[in-house]
Image (spheres, grey):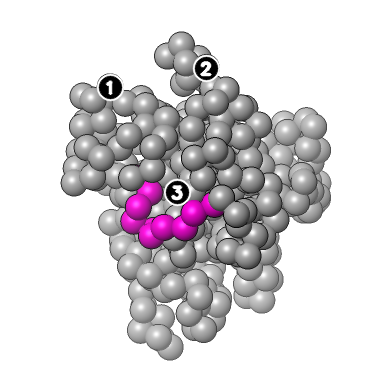
Amino acid sequence: MATGSEEPRLRVIWTDPITGRKGYAVIDRMVNGLAGGGTRMRAGLTLEEVERLARTMSYKNGAFNLPGGGAKGGVDIDPHDPEARGMLSRFVRAMTPLYRSGWGTAEDLGVTQELLNEVFAEQGVGMTVQAMLDRSGDAAAAGRRVVQGLAIKVEGIGLADVIGGYGVAEAAAAGAEHKGWDMKGMRAVVQGFGSMGGSSARYLARHGAKVVGVIDVNGAITNPDGLDVEKLLASRSALGEVDRKALGHEDKQGSRDSWLDIDTDILVPAAVGDVLTAANAGKVKARMVVEAANIPTTDEAQEILFKRGVLVIPDYVANGGANAWWWWTLLGVIEADADQS
């Protein structure tokens, strides 16, 4: 497994010829000639962020004993920008040699799997995990399993997202059990309501937790008596924006920055990185932080939380289920079946 002091295998900085914006790819480690990690899209993305995310993927793959190293890519543009899709397509075209030589990718922040599939098809790259398929021993069978798995919905949510959020909730339950806490009735706040955050909220609620706050790009939605998570899920957009028309009479709205002001026992950062820092870690009211997002807590914040007695379950443990599902489905360890997964 890679350590924090080692240099990544490869860094790529790409300039979009149309918008002038940057895209980045980092291969942290190759294992068996392969590296896995998603492709994201957000305004303000930096090479340093992508590099840290790629390192986290190395940890994640190592923690699950998966036969690949870590990688990550992304483009510095708001996913709502009219130029976003075109820039992503051009980025994929430019990164094609990496995809073909060993980097398998998938959806990430600001990028749905459906969009990524479309762009890869346009550029003639094949599937987003083509590198893994080509080395699987039976690319056709592995490809069928992945396609079948991606088509499965569980109560309206894609199977990979379900597995990711279910894993976050299970990690929270394990943390509560370790501490001797009863999950039933514990309050939870989920910052981010996209593929990982929405599914995490669903399964936290099914574990008996009371989801008292969710935060999307447009602000916070709170209810001290608990939100109707399923109603919010039914109203959200592909990028995790909740339709405010779906809110209940007792639900309140607040600013996006108010998420740390909400009284809670479980805090689930499920959006961007570095949202818990030395500057705000002292404001955390929760007893437990479960990292559904990648790198949401800086090293300085982790130290502060540890000294305060706040349990932090790291990203590569809490949110690794979806990544492992991709690998296990590719390798035929599991079939494309919701019950087996």
The alpha-carbon separation of the residues under discs 1 and 3 comes to 21 Å
How far apart are the two marked residues, 2 and 3, measured between alpha carbons? 22 Å
Q: Element type at marker 2?
A: loop
Residue placed farthest to the top in the image?
A: 180
Q: Which residue is mark 3?
A: 191
Indicate the amino acid at tag 1.
Gly
**Looking at this rendering, what residue extends furthest in the bottom direction?**
18
The mark nearer the N terminus, 1 or 3, is 3
Frontmost of labels 2 and 3 is 2
Residue at left offset 51%, top offset 45%: 223
Residue 98 visible in the snapshot: no
Contact, mark 1 vs mark 3 (Cβ under 8 Å): no
* 310 and 244: which is toward the camera: 244
User: Picture quarter containing residue 296?
Assistant: top left
Q: Earlier in the sequence, mark 2 or mark 3?
A: 2
What label does residue 226 carry, if any?
none
The residue to which callout 1 is attached is 309
Q: Which residues are magenta?
A: 251-260
Q: Write down the quadrant of residue 123 in the picture.
A: bottom right
Task: Check disc 3: other Cα within 10 Å, few if <14, some if 14-19, many if 20+.
Answer: many
